[in-house]
Image: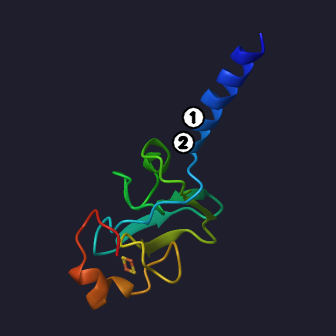
Amino acid sequence: PNHVCLYQRRDISSWLARWFPKTPAKSVVALKTPIKVDLVAGKTYRWCVCGRSKKQPFCDGSHFFQHTGLSPLKFKAQKTGTVALCTCKATQRPPYCDGTHRSEQVQKAEVGSPL
Ligand code: FES
């Protein structure tokens, strides 16, 4: 009957709103210094945008499981070598560290909190 359908639809939309919020959460400061990683040319990586990953600087799915509405940044390494990836999440050149972590704003922020 009709009322069952309506009930199910409401159920699905609240599920969607919970797991895919329309207003994304703010990124949080994961760390205040970059992490050097060895990248391989042509390989694709997922840089953590939300700051909640326990596998910094890479994504561990926390953006999804913590309902942030954010997504990781997928990027392909142009060459093989070591690069410093941002962990404060405030860089202007994601995923790379641009030195923003040295700013007073980042240094005064609490790890695990937004700027
Ligand atoms: S770690 Fe974010 S700018 Fe350096």
Quarter of the image that includes the N terminus? top right
The type of residue carrying mark 1 is Trp
Q: Find residue 15 and report its horizontal and vertical position in percent.
A: 57, 34
Circle 1 — which element?
helix
Quarter of the image that includes the C terminus? bottom left
- Identified at 54% across, 58% down, the residue is 72
In the image, taking residue 92 as reference, residue 114 lies left or right, namely left
- Whether the residues at callouts 1 and 2 have beta carbons within 8 Å, the answer is yes
- Identified at 43% across, 47% down, the residue is 62
| Mark number, residue 19 | 2
Image quadrant assignment for residue 7: top right
The type of residue carrying mark 2 is Trp
Count of numbered circles on the image: 2
Image quadrant assignment for residue 34: bottom left
Give the spatial CA distance, label 1 vs label 2: 6 Å
| Mark number, residue 15 | 1
